[in-house]
Amino acid sequence: MQKVKSKYQFLVNGEWSDGTSNKWVDIFSPETNEVVGSVPAMTQEEVDKAVRLAKEAQQTWADTAVHERSNLLYKWADKLEERKQEIGEMIANEVGKSPSSAIGEVVRTAEIIRYTAEEGVRIHGELMKGDSFPGGSKNKLALIQKEPLGVVLAISPFNYPVNLAAAKIAPALIAGNTVVFKPATQGAISGLLMIQALVDAGLPKSVVNVVTGRGSEIGDFVVTHSLIDMISFTGGTKTGQDIAQKAKMIPLVLELGGKDPALVLEDADIEQAAAQIIGGAFSYSGQRCTAIKKVFVLDSVADDLVSKLTEKVTQLKVGKASEEATVVPLINERAADFVEGLISDAKEKGAKIVTGGDRTGNFIEPTLIDNVTPNMDIAWEEQFGPALPIIRVSSVFEAIELEKKSEFGLQASIFTKNTQDAFTIASKLNVGTVQLNGKPERGPDHFPFLGVKNSGLGVQGIGRSIESMMRDKVMVINL
């Protein structure tokens, strides 16, 4: 890939190109608001070429021995680790993460790719006997093979531009699919550097093609392209719902928004709960789908919890991501506008701003909001920022009933010393994952990861991701 005056090229058919439109999309640093670099605004004709060439390359890639596909992933992981500093610095600049977190993302991505390479060689078919079904014949055998789906469209988000991209691309490749990769505009350069490492590892032509540009211009075109066989998307709920409506008859895996609650019971270790809640709510300014986004706390321990949370919020390092701050500027001004609006709405309706609440540009102070009630927008809307609503409840039953009304269902945390109570409550929460005495999080990356309701569709986690990108093909043998 050539870079001229911070202009980065896209990849189609093994060739890096500026494109024909002569239009570029500038990417601004959340911290400095300076241009980090630019990526091509591809035309629909160029996107069509990328998809068609991926389709042409798919059968040859599927016929490649799985151990060879696995070897490519191992080499990719090695190349990423060799460049962790370079790629990490770009992640930090482009999406406003601390340098240590950004470099850590690259290392974690290499680990995901290696695990995928190892897991992929274990995917086998099965043999079924006909006489195991009443009236069936022992002279019938079903040979069930695992086949790739074809061309996978991988759409990644801004907040983990390398990790959540590779978590789609690696399973698709090991399964025998080719990939059209559409990175989020904010994070696209990091994604391109990640793919450069894959090219240098020996990626065959068009096994992965990368398309760049604004979703408003090429998004619908690529999502509805007739040669796309599967879509794996991570991003906002509204965009995911739009994709689901337009994609029609192809498999989807959607990782969408969350409003992950923490339930703090009367017998909880308040110190532990407060530490986990603060870490879960404010790391990277809460710009994660698995951030704790609201707290249900029993009245009897609410004052104690709020006191502990207040103490820990004041200890957070705020400021520049480049200086390893925890609470950093949000990705852009629009994101800050939204969070500020939620804080203002809660305040106007009677909530108490315990700490923070002020804004400078796209930076919002870490904000604790007590006495939040169901008529306030922040009780339901996903803030994706450093503002934490605290909802006092008189009983666990009240918390469960309120949570059932949420449109989201990604994860939830329960803080209690009573394991039996935790299991009972967990069984009543309509979420993908329940964390006991810990904050929500995506990993370890081989665990199943899913959301229900408007938080997603399908299951991820390395093994599940591979399976989602394959299908059964049955041959019935009549003896």
Image (cartoon, helix red, strand yellow):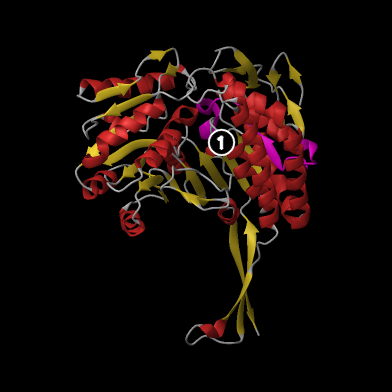
Q: Is residue 230 above or below residue 285?
A: below
Q: Residue at x 32, y 44 (%)?
A: 263
Report the residue at 76% width, 34% height from top: 82
Q: Nearer the viewer, residue 268 or 18?
A: 268
Q: Nearer the viewer, residue 182 or 296?
A: 296
Q: Is residue 202 left or right of residue 249?
A: right
- Residue 467, compared with residue 9, is above or below; it is below
Residue 130 vertical placement versus 248 (above, below): below
| Residue type at tag 1 | Ser
Relative depth, front residue between 373 and 406: 373
In the picture, residue 105 is in which quadrant? top right
Residue 62 location, quadrant: bottom right
Secondary element at tag 1 = loop
Q: Quadrant of the C terminus?
A: bottom right
- Does 56 lie within the magenta span? no
* Of residues 107 and 166, the one drawn nearer to the viewer in this rendering: 107
Residue sitting at 37 percent across and 22 percent down? Answer: 338
Residue 10 percent location from the top left of the image: 69, 28
The answer to whether residue 211 is magenta is yes
The residue under the point 78% across, 42% down is 204
Q: x, y (%) of residue 403?
A: 29, 45
Which quarter shows the N terminus?
Answer: top right
> Dot 1, how many residues are within 10 Å of its Cα: few (below 14), some (14-19), or many (20+)?
many
Which segment is the magenta one? 199-221
Task: Report which residue position mark 1 lands on.
Answer: 156
Q: Is residue 442 shown left or right of residue 4? A: left
- Tell me if 315 is positioned left or right of 22 in this view: left
Is residue 380 at least partly visible in the picture?
A: no
